[in-house]
Image: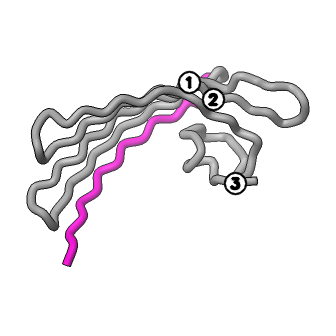
Amino acid sequence: PICFSSQTAVNSIDEPEYTSLVKGGLSLSIKPVKQLLLAASGNAVFDYPDSEIKYKGTEAGLNANLQLFSDFNINAGISQFFAKEEKASKGTFTLTATLAF
């Protein structure tokens, strides 16, 4: 089996580190100009702890990747997990810059 941390698997605040999470959804990406890639995704998240599948919530995300030069990249992403139980909902924003030598 493949195991993920809770942050890698889904942006829920209260999932144990190794779980029986199942996530499925759709993603869309478009490259409106040569240097820019835009992406959006939506997922339904389920937990399968024993022999019963339980709906945990929905996850949505947006991402933008800008390649300014051949060796310099900027990436921004935002995602939100809408939990079935409100207290487990969580949002994240990431901003990264990559410089290759």
Q: Which element type, helix, strand or loop, lies under badge 2?
A: strand
The answer to whether 48 appears left or right of 61 in the picture is: right
Residue that label 2 marks: 45
Amino acid at pointer 3: Cys
Residue at the outermost right position: 51
Which numbered disc, 3 or 1, marks the residue that appears first in the sequence? Answer: 3
Q: Which element type, helix, strand or loop, lies under badge 1?
A: strand
Task: Identify the image quadrant of residue 13.
Answer: top right
Please say if the residues under marks 2 and 1 sit with CB atoms less than 8 Å apart: yes
Residue that label 3 marks: 3
Q: Is residue 12 above or below residue 85?
A: below
Q: Position of residue 35 (x, y in %)?
A: 12, 47
Count residues near mark 2 (Cα–Cα under 10 Å), then give few for <14, some for 14-19, many for 20+.
many
Task: Identify the image quadrant of residue 2.
Answer: bottom right
Residue at horizontal 16 percent and vertical 67 percent from the top: 71
Residue that label 1 marks: 58
Q: Is residue 89 magenta?
A: yes
The answer to whether 2 appears left or right of 65 in the picture is: right
Q: Which residues are magenta?
A: 86-101
